[in-house]
């Protein structure tokens, strides 16, 4: 969890001021500093804000290309106003208000002292504005000088009352099925070019998703069915028209004559189920979306992070924001920074539409731990084979049935060597030029046949590996990687071989290549190597990839064991114990998990509970593996001390 600042405004208004504001700095959910201050009445801000909202509506309504229609009742002589001057005046008034003495000396100066006066890119944090009145969310908080000085921060709106999310139970450390799944709903798009949004989203996060679904003009029951999908979604995006009156709001989900809207009340039940199953971000890219979010919160729904528009916005600017937002999410920025950067990108539109960069806003409860998209390294389904000299018997049995393929591969390999020689000879004799066309055809065949020949080369490598012929095995593993660049298995096998040959650089590079190609076993092995090199943060990132991508219990167990190992080194004993126990649930015969868990239990003063795991350490360990041999020795010492063995 990143550093967080919470400003609780308490009771108050622009008319009466806010007499008692409390600011907290929280680190990992724990309050480390607390300050108090106040804000005076600011009737000028209230007046200018009302004028800016009217001008926003008027500007939108005169731009038919935007497709957003705003009723102009009560607005007269708009053409005589200067939108830029009004917005500039609003920002200046808001900035002066937030620079008032009691607020600055009581809160802002103390915040700067703790965070570092220079601001800039060094500090990264969220600022939550807690308020009882959702109308306060509309104010131009971006005008605060504090936000401007700290470029890696963002102001987030929150209700003053909230509760922690209730999520579907899952095994410790295993992500919910919703992780990496995005649902984009296109509603009534008259006058809006949603195709541009679709293109941008696919380009930015298409490779980061387990599932990217575009639902165009759904019926109400179709939308509800998707909201209640068994696996559900991590992000729900709505683009289209919406509206709101004094009593309720609704989305225009399609362009038919009937069943073309859904109310907030209708959405709530589906959203409740989605949140329980892991929905983490709701994006409402429509002109009345702030009011809709307020209605959802007022109805008691524990909203996840929600991005809305605080005022009507032209289609071109809305699209530019969506494009930037998903690009930054795709680059692994945390949500609040992605929103900040995307809003900053909108400054280029300020001359055309005053206040454009301040219209998108993030609403979020402080109990939410933040969102990042998972990194899905390859969606190809790999068939797991033996990754060491102890090969899978079924594959060895199939080896004989591949004799014709192997023979062809050997001919191909010979021809490849001859081809290399011909490339040298081409510089010696002009006579060899006649083979140019043939060589081009050979190269093309080489690439086309790669997916067929690479597994065969890998099998030959495995066979030689098993018969202790490392040089031949290495050559065939390398050949398999050359003729099919996306094939992960030979990289894994090559890493195991290099490790046995004590070539650590080769082993590390090959395993990293297997990780990049999405091979599940490679995550566990790579994180182990990083652990041994004391690169804990890199190890944790690789472990997260492992748990995101693998479906195999053995791999999950290994990665959870490695994460527990990191926690143990960090002296987070409770977290380490949880990870080791979960790893054992997935694979009870994990000798190292039992060994490490026993050590943690002893450290926590529970030696009796550790005995069972010392016994299983001996039962499942292999003395030929150095780490497990050390575990055996420790386990024997512990059990002898306790009188359990003789």
Image: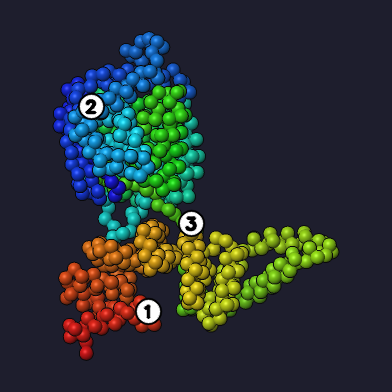
Instruction: Return the residue nearer the eye: 600 or 428.
Output: 428
Q: Residue at x 67, y 71 (%)?
A: 413
Q: Is residue 326 visible?
A: yes
Q: Quadrant of residue 576?
A: bottom left
Which is in the foreground here, disc 1 or disc 3? Answer: 1
Quarter the C terminus occupies? bottom left
Q: Residue furthest right?
A: 431
Q: Are marks 2 and 1 in contact (CB under 8 Å)?
A: no
Determine whether the residue tagged by mark 1 lies in a helix, strand or loop. helix
Q: Are marks 2 and 3 in contact (CB under 8 Å)?
A: no
- Residue at label 1? 626
Instruction: Return the residue nearer the eye: 495 or 379.
Output: 495
Relative image position of residue 269 (x, y in whole percent): 27, 41
- Residue at label 2? 100
Q: Is residue 225 visible?
A: no
Relative image position of residue 325 (x, y in whole percent): 42, 39
Q: Which mark is residue 378?
A: 3
Q: Are marks 1 and 3 in contact (CB under 8 Å)?
A: no
Left or right of 81 on screen, residue 391: right
Q: Earlier in the sequence, mark 2 or mark 1?
A: 2
Determine whether the residue tagged by mark 3 lies in a helix, strand or loop. loop
Q: Earlier in the sequence, mark 2 or mark 3?
A: 2
């Amino acid at each position: 969890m990143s550093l967080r600042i919470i400003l609780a405004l308490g009771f108050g208004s622009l008319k009466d001021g806010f007499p008692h504001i409390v600011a907290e700095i929280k680190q990992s959910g724990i309050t480390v500093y607390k300050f108090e201050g106040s804000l005076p009445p600011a009737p000028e801000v209230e007046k200018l804000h009302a004028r800016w909202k009217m001008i926003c509506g008027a500007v939108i309504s005169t731009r038919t290309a935007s497709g957003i229609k705003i009723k102009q009742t009560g607005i007269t002589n708009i053409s005589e106003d200067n939108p830029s001057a009004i917005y500039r005046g609003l920002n200046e008034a808001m900035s002066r208000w937030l620079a008032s003495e009691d607020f600055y000396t009581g809160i802002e100066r103390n915040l700067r002292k703790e965070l570092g006066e220079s601001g800039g890119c060094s500090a990264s944090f969220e600022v939550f504005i807690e308020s009882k009145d959702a109308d306060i969310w509309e104010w131009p908080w971006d005008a605060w000088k504090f936000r401007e000085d700290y470029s890696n921060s963002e102001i987030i709106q929150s209700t003053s009352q909230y509760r922690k999310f209730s999520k579907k139970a899952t095994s410790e450390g295993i992500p919910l099925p919703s992780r990496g799944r995005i649902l984009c709903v296109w509603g009534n798009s008259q006058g809006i070019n949603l195709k541009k949004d679709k293109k941008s989203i696919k380009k930015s996060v298409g490779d980061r998703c387990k599932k990217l679904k575009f639902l165009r003009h759904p019926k109400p029951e179709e939308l509800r069915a998707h909201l209640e999908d068994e696996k559900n979604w991590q992000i729900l995006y709505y683009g289209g028209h919406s509206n709101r009156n004094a009593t309720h709001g609704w989305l225009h989900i399609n362009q038919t004559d009937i069943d073309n809207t859904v109310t907030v009340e209708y959405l709530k039940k589906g959203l409740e189920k989605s949140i329980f199953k892991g929905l983490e971000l709701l994006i409402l890219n429509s002109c009345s979306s702030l009011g809709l979010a307020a209605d959802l919160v007022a109805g008691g729904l524990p909203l996840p992070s929600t991005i809305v528009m605080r005022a009507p916005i032209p289609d071109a600017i809305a699209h530019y924001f969506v494009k930037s937002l998903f690009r930054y999410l795709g680059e692994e920025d945390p949500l609040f920074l992605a929103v900040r950067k995307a809003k900053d990108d909108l400054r280029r539109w300020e001359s055309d539409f005053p206040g454009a960069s301040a219209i998108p806003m993030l609403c979020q409860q402080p109990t939410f731990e933040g969102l990042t998209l998972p990194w899905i390294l390859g969606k190809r389904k790999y068939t797991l084979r033996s990754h060491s000299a102890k090969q899978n018997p079924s594959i060895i049995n199939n080896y004989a049935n591949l004799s014709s393929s192997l023979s062809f591969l050997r001919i191909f390999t010979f021809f490849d060597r001859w081809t290399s020689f011909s490339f040298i000879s081409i510089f010696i004799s002009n006579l060899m030029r006649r083979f140019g066309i043939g060589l081009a055809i050979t190269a093309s065949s080489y690439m086309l046949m790669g997916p067929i020949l690479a597994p065969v080369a890998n099998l030959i490598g495995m066979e030689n590996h098993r018969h202790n012929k490392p040089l031949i095995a290495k050559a065939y593993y390398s050949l398999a990687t050359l003729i099919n660049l996306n094939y992960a298995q030979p990289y894994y096998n090559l890493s195991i071989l290099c490790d046995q040959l004590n070539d650590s650089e080769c082993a590390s590079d090959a395993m990293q290549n297997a990780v990049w190609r999405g091979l599940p076993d490679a995550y566990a092995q790579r994180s182990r190597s990083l652990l041994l090199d004391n690169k804990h943060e890199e190890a944790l990132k690789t472990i997260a990839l492992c748990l995101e991508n693998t479906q195999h219990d053995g791999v999950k167990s290994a990665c959870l064991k490695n994460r527990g190992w990191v926690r143990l080194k960090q002296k987070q004993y409770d977290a380490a114990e949880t990870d080791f126990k979960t790893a054992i649930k997935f694979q009870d015969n994990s000798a190292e998990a039992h060994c490490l868990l026993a050590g943690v239990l002893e450290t926590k003063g529970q030696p009796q509970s550790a005995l069972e795991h010392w016994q299983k350490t001996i039962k499942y360990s292999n003395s030929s593996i150095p780490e497990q041999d050390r575990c055996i020795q420790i386990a024997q010492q512990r059990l002898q001390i306790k009188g359990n063995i003789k």
